[in-house]
Amino acid sequence: MGEVLSKTRVRSLLESTLTRLARLSQPCLILLVFTLCLFRISETEVDPDLWGHLKFGGDIWASSKACQADTYSYLSGEVLWINHEWLAETIFYLLYKSWGTTGLILFKTGLSFLILGTLYRHLVRSGLRPVRAGFLLVFALLMLLPGVWHIRPQLFTYCFFLGTVILILRAEQGDLRGLWFTIPIVGLWANLHGGVLSGLGVLGIYALARALARLLKRHSWFEWNVVVPIFLAFVASFLTPYGAGQWKLLLQPIVLVRPEIPEWQAVPLFSPYGLVYGALLLLTSASLFSARHRVSLTIFVNYTAIAITPLLAVRNGPLMAIGILILTAEYLAKALETWIPSKQEVPRRGSQALWSITSIMLAFGLAVLSIPNLRCIRFPPDTDYPVGAVRLLKESGTTGNLAVFFNWGQYVIWHLGPGIRVSIDGRRDSLYSEKIYWQNLNFSEGRDEWDTLVTNHDTHLALVSRHYPIYELMKGRPGWSLAYEDKHSALFVADASLFGEKLKRIGGHFLLEKSPDCLP
C-alpha cells in the first residue's frame, strides 16, 4: 500500500512539474533569445578609434576643456579641433579609469540591452506575440552587431534614435506632447555623437510629411505643437562648445566621397549582412502593404527614408533596423497573425516541457560563455597592430614625427603621444585637410606621389604595413633605413635622425615575446 502511494506521489509530482514547465515554454524561449543577445553583444573587439576616445577623453577631463589644441600630429598645425564626440569620450575615459575594460564592456552591453529590451517591449505592446517579437529581435540583433562589436560613440546614437522614432510614432498616434522631449534629447545627443543628424533628419521628414498630409486634406499646414518643438530641437543642436562650427564638420560626410572606407559604402546586397537587410525590408514592407487600413503618409514617408539609408552607407544598418521595426510593429502584428494564424489546439504538454528544459539549458550555457567576454576587449584574431614597433619606440625613449598607417594613428597616440607625433589618425575630417589626408593615403598604399609625406614634411620615422607596396618602396629609398620589422609592420628611420643609429642598434635585437590578446 505504501509503495502504491509513493508511486502515485511521484507520478503526481512529475505531472505537476511537466505542467509548470509547459507553462514556461514561451518565457524560457524568450530567455534564450535574450541570453543569445547577451552572448553576442558582450563580445567586444578593439576599434582603431578606441585609443583616441580614451586619450582625448582623458585630456578633456584633466583640463576641464572640451576645446583642445591638437598636440598629437605634426601636420595639423596645433589648431583647435572640433571634437563632436567630446562628451562620449569623457564618459569612456572615466569608465576605463574607474573600472578598466570591464567597465567599458558592461556599459556597452548595458546600452545595447536597453535598445533591444525597449524594442522588444514595443513590439509586444504593439500586439506581437512574445515568441514572434523574439524572432524579430534576432533580426534586429543581426543588424545591430556591426555597430555594437566595438565601443564607439555610435552607441548613444542608437539609443537616442530609438527614442526619437518612438516619439514620432506617438505623435502620429495623437500624443504630440512627446515632441517636446526631442529638445533635451537633441541637445545632449549633439555633444555625444555626430549621429544627431539622423535624429534631426527623421524629425524634419516627419514635420514635412505631416504638413503635406494636412495640406492634402485642405487643413492648415502649420501646427505650433509640431513645428515649434522640432524647430527648438534644431536650435538645441547648436548648444555645443563649438556652436555652428560643428555643423560644418557634421555635414562633410554628406558631400565627401570616401571610397576607401567600407562602412561608408552601400550595403552589399548579396553579403550575409545584405541578405538580413533584404529579409527585414521585405517582411516590414509586406506588412505595410497588407495593412487592412490605410498607412498614414507620415509613417510611410519616414519608413521609406529610414529603409533606404543602408543603401547610402553600411553604418546606417543598425538605425534602419531600429527605425522600421518601431514604425511597423503594429502592422507586423496584424500581418503575421493573418499569414501564420496561431494554432487553436493545445500543444502537447511533454513537448512544451522539453522546449522549456532545452531553452533553459542553452540559456545557461550562453550566460556562462558570456562571462569571459565581460573581461576582455579582444584584438583581432590575427592582430595587425604594430605592437612590436610601438613597444620598441616606447622602450627606446624615441621622440619625433612619425608617418603612420591611418588605422594605427590613434594606437600610436595612446601609447606614445605627444612625444611621438603622427601624420594621420582617425580625426580625419575634424583635423586634417583634404590635401594632407590624401598625401597620407598615397603614402600608405605606395601610389602616385607616395613620397610627398617624407619629402615635403619634417618626417623622422615611418611606420608602414608590410602588406602594402610602401614596404618595398621604403626599403629602396635612399636616406632611410629599416630599424625593425615583424610579420605585420616595419619601422623605418631617417638616417639623419638623432635617434637613427640607436633605433637601428636596438631594433636589430628587439624581440616581441607575444602580441596581446586583450586591451590592458
Image (cartoon, rainbow, N blue to C red):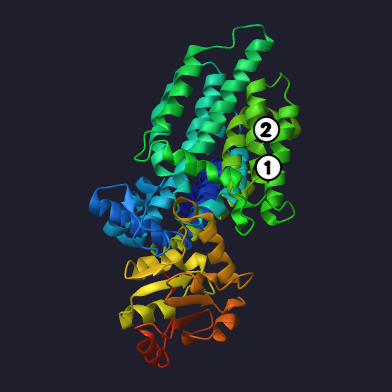
Asked whether, in this view, residue 6 is left or right of residue 243, the answer is right
* Residue 116 place in picture, x, y as percent: 51, 43
**Identity, as a three-letter code, of the amino acid under mark 2:** Thr
> Can see residue 374?
no
Residue sitting at x 60%, y 30%? 327
Whichever of callouts 1 and 2 sits on the residue coming sooner in the sequence is 1
Secondary structure found at label 2: helix
The residue tagged 2 is 304
Q: Vertically, is 442 above or below 154?
A: below
Give the quarter of the image for residue 396. Answer: bottom left
**Identity, as a three-letter code, of the amino acid under mark 1:** Leu
Please tell me which residue lies in front, 37 or 60: 60
Residue sitting at x 53%, y 15%? 174
> Can see residue 461?
yes
* Residue 87 place in picture, x, y as percent: 35, 45
Residue sitting at x 57%, y 41%? 319
Asked whether, in this view, residue 258 is left or right of residue 376, the answer is right
The residue tagged 1 is 280
Q: Vertically, is 98 above or below 423?
A: above
User: Which quarter of the figure is the C terminus placed in?
Assistant: bottom left
How many neighbours does mark 1 have within 10 angstroms: few (below 14), some (14-19), or many (20 or more)?
Answer: many
Please tell me which residue lies in front, 490 or 151: 490
